[in-house]
Amino acid sequence: MRFLVIFIVYFFSQSSFTLFAQEEEESKKGIFFGGVSIGSFFANSNTAVVYTGGSNITPYGINYILTLPQNKTTFDAYFKYPYWVEELPQEPAYKAAFDIGLHLGVYLSKINSIYMDLNITEINYEQTFTMAIDNPLNMSPEPTYEQIPIIGKEKRFNLNLGTQLSFYSYEKVALYWSFFGNINSVKLERNYIVINNRWVLKIHFFHFDLKKIVEPIYQFS
């Protein structure tokens, strides 16, 4: 769900700086208006589960990349004792995102106009999953637990095309009915885990990404 505070600057109208030093004409036909929308984007969390790295989402998730031969030696040395994924994020959710867009339109008549809303939003997912390490030196029957960051990022594009029909107008106040259609797309940009603030392992969703998985893991300098 998205909550936007919309600041609209009308061009060539009574409430804007006009190019003409004259009174507003009776008809607004052909007059353009536009503005920007600024606010916060609160994405529905139902789709955030795709970034958890679970085997029910992708066979090439967390368990898979930890057991790859070129990775396993490194993490065997880091954890030292037998280790496994104890728990994935239980309540996956996106972070609130900054949203900015354009609002453009043209009057077809004094009471009717067509308009376009365009918004592009970058959404982040930042949570942790739990690794268990069977450390015999921790003086406890329970394993040692370590929280591992898991990061996701996506871009969302929204385009609304519609019409506004004024049902009330008085001086500088106008109320509209709005009818529109929506075109949108979502691009999953990245999904990875960070272990010990040094190693970054990419999570991939499809088989054709395997050529990227077998590349050496990235290590911070």
Image (cartoon, grey):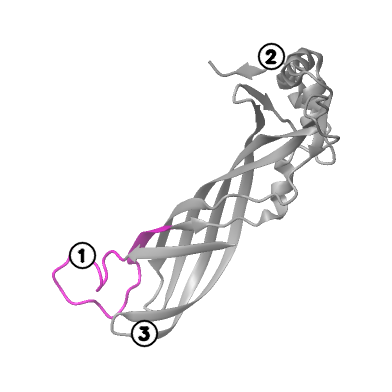
Q: Nearer the viewer, mark 1 or mark 2?
A: 2
218 vs 168, left or right, is: right
Q: Amino acid at mark 1?
A: Phe
Position of residue 105 measured from the top left corner of the image (x, y, whole percent) = 41, 63
In the structure shown, which secondary structural element does the residue marked by tag 1 occupy? loop
From the image, give the main secondary structure of the stretch colored magenta.
Answer: loop
- Residue 159 seen in the figure: yes
The reply to whether the magenta stretch includes residue 15 is yes
Q: Which image quarter: residue 170?
A: bottom left
| Residue drawn at 47 percent across, 73 percent down | 164
Q: Which label's residue is closer to the chain start, 1 or 2?
A: 1
Q: Is residue 136 above or below residue 35?
A: above
Considering the image in quadrants, where does the N terminus appear?
A: bottom right
The reply to whether the magenta stretch includes residue 24 is yes
Dot 1 crowding, Cα within 10 Å, few <14, some 14–19, many 20+: few
In magenta, the rendered stretch is: 10-38
Q: Which image quarter: residue 2?
A: bottom right
Which residue corresponds to mark 3? 169
Q: Which label's residue is closer to the chain start, 2 or 3?
A: 3
In the structure shown, which secondary structural element does the residue marked by tag 2 occupy? loop
| Residue drawn at 81 percent across, 21 percent down | 81
| Residue drawn at 77 percent across, 24 percent down | 65
Residue 216's disc number: 2
Residue 17's disc number: 1
Q: Amino acid at mark 2?
A: Pro
- Residue placed most toward the observer, 207 or 202: 202
Q: Amino acid at mark 3?
A: Ser
169 vs 56, left or right, is: left
Q: Nearer the viewer, mark 2 or mark 3?
A: 2
